[in-house]
Each structure stands twice: as structure tokens, then as C-alpha cells.
Image (spheres, helix red, strand yellow):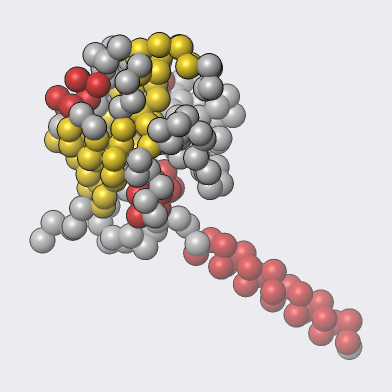
Amino acid sequence: MIKLTFTFFMLAVLSFGLVADTQKQPGENIQKDNYYPLVKFETSMGDLVIELNRRKAPATANNFLSYVKRGEFDNTLFHRVIPDYIIQGGGYDPEYQEKKASRSIINESGNGLKNNIYSVAMAREDDPHSAKRQFFFNMKDNNNLDPGKTWGYTVFGSVIDGTDVLDKMALVETEYKALIRFQDAPKKNVLLIAATVLPEPE
């Protein structure tokens, strides 16, 4: 009887833990009824606004929102700029020290959103489910980044204001940075000064 009671107790604890874990999706309670939250980027080259698509990329959008709400993107670099390709950021401070990242998120690249110009997508490693905090803006229609026979790169929003700021960023002079082993780092730091979730439209 004692063994049965203990077994039942352990199953209840495990079940509660699984339920609790599923309820702790990062960012899900930030404007939880808004499928298209807006995020403002204040950068060293001007401001832009991103519309997230929580309907088609819920895990990715919620993950991104959680970083924004915690101020994790504030004072970070756009560390990779490749004209007519991408502008990448979110992972390094101004001294090129890597920022702490939360757990990896599931790849949602099959959601129908394309890596078209001015869309925003998650950067990742070879593992398709390795995206954490780094993101990039597509600076042309990058069809090669969409899923096909292999996993693609998850698009989770698009720039709705300030595309001219991205166009200016794409023209900055770049160089090789030994600290991150990238060929395309801006010679002069391009900063994401602050990221803010904008109020819901009334």
C-alpha cells in the first residue's frame, strides 16, 4: 500500500511538472491576445518597427518577445552586415562578448512565411532547432533560406516602418573580426540601443 501511494505521488509530481513546463512558454503572456505585436528598435542609425507574426510562428515570436521584455537586446551589436543578403544581430555586446542565451527553440520554418526582403528571421547553427537569440533581417528575397528538402530559417515577422534605416546599415564598411571569426563585421559599431514592445493598438 505504501509503495502504491508513493508511486501515485511521484506520478502526480511528474505530471504537474510537465504541465507547469508547458505553461512556461517564454513571452506567451506578453500581449497574449495580440497575434501581431509590434517591437520598436532604436538603433545608432535610426528607428524601425517590426511586426511579429505570432499566429504562424508562436514559439519564435514568444521567445523574441521575452528577450525584448527583459531588455536583453538593449546595447547589443549588429555584428554581421552583408549587402544584398542579411543584417544580423542580437548576440553580442559592444565589446564583442557573447550574450547569455536561453534554451533553443523549435524550428518553425515550415510556417509559410518566406525569407523575403525586410522580413526578420532567426539565426541558427547547422542543427535546425538551435536558434536561441540571434536574428537577422533579410536584405533581399533569400529563397535559399526557405525550407525545401532541408530545414529553413524561421521567419517570424517583418519590418513595417524604417526600412530606410536597414538600407543605410547595409552600406556600412565592414572588416574581419577575429573575436567572432566573421568577415562582415561593421568597422564602426552599429548598435541596437533599445528594443521595446509597443502598446497594443486600440
Q: Residue at x 32, y 20 (%)?
A: 188
Left or right position of 50 against 147: left
Tell me the quadrant of the picture where the N terminus can be found.
bottom right
Q: Residue at x 27, y 15 (%)?
A: 172
Q: Residue at x 33, y 25 (%)?
A: 189
Left or right position of 145 against 8: left
Inspect this view and state whether residue 113 appears. no
Whether residue 29 is situated above or below residue 71 in the rendered picture: below
Q: Nearer the viewer, residue 81 or 28?
A: 81
Whether residue 73 is situated above or below residue 29 in the rendered picture: above
The quadrant where residue 28 appears: bottom left
Whether residue 15 is situated above or below residue 88 in the rendered picture: below
Total numbered labels: 0
Tell me the quadrant of the picture where the C terminus can be found.
bottom left
Residue 128 percent coordinates (x, y): 55, 30
Q: Nearer the viewer, residue 107 or 177?
A: 177
Left or right position of 178 against 76: right
Whether residue 5 is situated above or below residue 202 in the rendered picture: below
The quadrant where residue 40 appears: top left
Q: Residue at x 88, y 87 (%)?
A: 2
Inspect this view and state whether residue 124 appears. yes
The quadrant where residue 190 appears: top left
Residue 142 percent coordinates (x, y): 34, 17
The single residue placed furthest to the left in the displayed view is: 202
Q: Nearer the viewer, residue 107 or 165?
A: 165
Residue 29 percent coordinates (x, y): 37, 63
Q: Nearer the viewer, residue 134 or 59?
A: 134
Residue 6 percent coordinates (x, y): 82, 81
